[in-house]
Image (tube, helix red, strand yellow):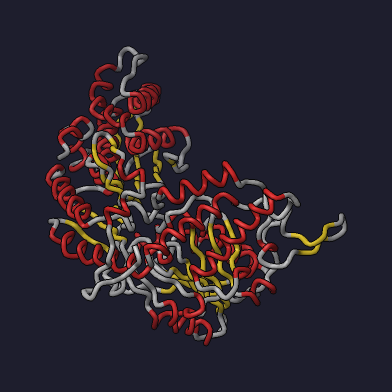
Amino acid sequence: MDGAVNPRGEADFDVERIRADFPILATEHRGKKLVFLDSGASAQKPRQVIDTMIRTMETAYANVHRGAYHLSETATAAYEAARAACARFLNAPRPEDIIFTSNSTMAINLVAHSYGRGIMKPGQAVVISEMEHHANLVPWQMLRDGHGTELRVCRITDAGELDLNHLAELLADGKVGLVAVTHMSNVLGSVTPATLIARMAHEAGAKVLFDGSQAAVHRRVDVQAIDADFYCFTGHKLYGPTGIGVLYARAALQKAMPPFLGGGDMIASVTFERTTWAEPPAKFEAGTPPIIEAVGLHAAIDYVEAIGLPAIEAHERALVDHAMATLPHVEGLTIYGKAQDRGGVFAFALDNAHAHDLSTLLDRAGIAVRAGRHCTEPLHERLGAGAGTCRASFGLYTTKAEIDYLAEALASARRFFA
Amino acid sequence: MFDDLRDLYQEVILDHGRKPRNFRRLENGTHHARGDNPLCGDKMELWLALNEDGTIADAAFQGRGCAISMASASLMTETVKGKSVADAHKLGEQFRELAMTGTCPHCAAGLEDEMERLAPLSGVHEFPSRVKCATLAWHTLNSALDNQGKEASSE
């Protein structure tokens, strides 16, 4: 597995060999082979991640940054090596630019608190988009209500792309302190033009945050090329464990921002009268961090990089093309989003079946999809799909045959409800 | 492909799901409540008209949701018409037991016919994530009868 792409642009990608790394894909559910199309919610874990976490607990575990004994030093080195791996993964300038959190939600809340409350002034505005996950919406509403900032919502086009003209209008008065948008929609699959958005934000005097929860799994992210101020992703969608998230934050911002949570590990010295903060990123990591999870995330990054992001991207592009060639033939099926640049996420609805009924049927066929509004209630209202949709999302183990099987099951479900 | 799901989606459920009965506003209603399942986006609005003797003269609903939740609301409005408030509450309790366990061994005497009518929904007990779809209408009925104006939630 060397990540090569052949001249036809197809990945030199042995999907069966990859599938063999994921023990859960060999399991059966109610006598049906598992067809897991919910990686956008949380991805499955390869043997390499599972084994690394077990081995860590069995042979190399202690608390970090505390003990002066060998085992603690070993664990600390492993934890910090994970930070360095995340920095390389995002092409961050230094390992210290990476703050470990518990997930993307916590990363965004950290920025809302430390940058929003700590640096932004009441009256300044935060710009989000219509296609944000609740995780990149609710923290900014809370900031608005608690700190007096304004919340502006950038429209999307009917194709499901960010409306850049509207973004320019929202930035025009110079009051925007932060643009916080997704790098890839978890519903429409739309990939946003991050470099351009960052330039527009900076020219208007604003900082920019990208929610990379979906994007970081599907393509190479380079925070320096994008010129991002903040970029976050979560471990469990990247074939790693739950309980660990990553926030890249520009060094100068980390220095200026006050801490988020108080406690151990984030301090330099403590008296009853006053406390001084540790240097970043420790300043933002109060309490015992997710040590085993960091090591697991490191293993996941190693796993993904061994396959190669270009190969993963090519594999997923082939899956997206295949889905776009297959699913529209299912009678009565609506697929949401027609972005030019889209990743392996498809929200859809059948004309004669509610999303929940449909997912119950698909589950009976062994197919796991998400049903509901996928933490994007306002987007579903915008799409005229307030009753909910089903969503199929692909991972590096997804096959074209699984997409064919989904299409077949959808046609069969439509007949069932006819 | 899905023949074994006919226990859950019996013909009567598909029929009530497609063509819910009493699917209208009740202009002269005496009781009203909204029900909401925030997880999946099901929403319903229920109206009741009570006689002076406390029996339910009419029941109607509007809303959006899956076949199970629409069929359950439809069957419920048919079933509670003509019942006393106490019997409506009792039916609700028994229905929740039926939806969660598939049976109702302690069902009260005198309401057997009504429970028979609701029995097609008993299949949801095998689908833990769908039980709430079936019980939303009955939660909404409770809040219409007990807490005027308070929104019912399946959560």
Q: Residue at x 57, y 84 (%)?
A: A205
Residue A238, quarter of the rendered image: bottom left
Above/below status of A51 relative to A136: above
Query: In x, y percent, where is residue B95?
Result: 34, 26
User: Can you see residue A391?
Assistant: no
Given residues A197 and A156, the one toward you in this image is: A197
**Image-based side of A102 in relation to A313, left or right:** right
Q: Residue at x 56, y 78 (%)?
A: A207
Q: Where residue A307 sits: x, y (%)?
A: 37, 63
In the rendered image, is residue B109 in sight? yes
Residue visible at 25% across and 72% down in the picture? A6
Task: Locate residue A397 relative to residue B4 in the image: left or right.
Answer: right
Q: How many marks?
A: 0
Screen quadrant of the N terminus of chain A: bottom left
Q: Does residue A305 sit above or below A405 in this rendering?
A: below
Q: Which quarter of the rendered picture does the C terminus of chain A lie within?
A: top left
Q: Position of residue A278 (x, y in %)?
A: 74, 64
In front here: A1 or A256?
A: A1
Q: Quadrant of residue B73?
A: top left
On the image, the x and y values in percent for residue A243 come to 53, 51
**Does B106 sit above or below residue A226?**
above
Say whether residue B91 is left or right of residue B119.
right
Residue drawn at 54 percent across, 68 percent down: A87
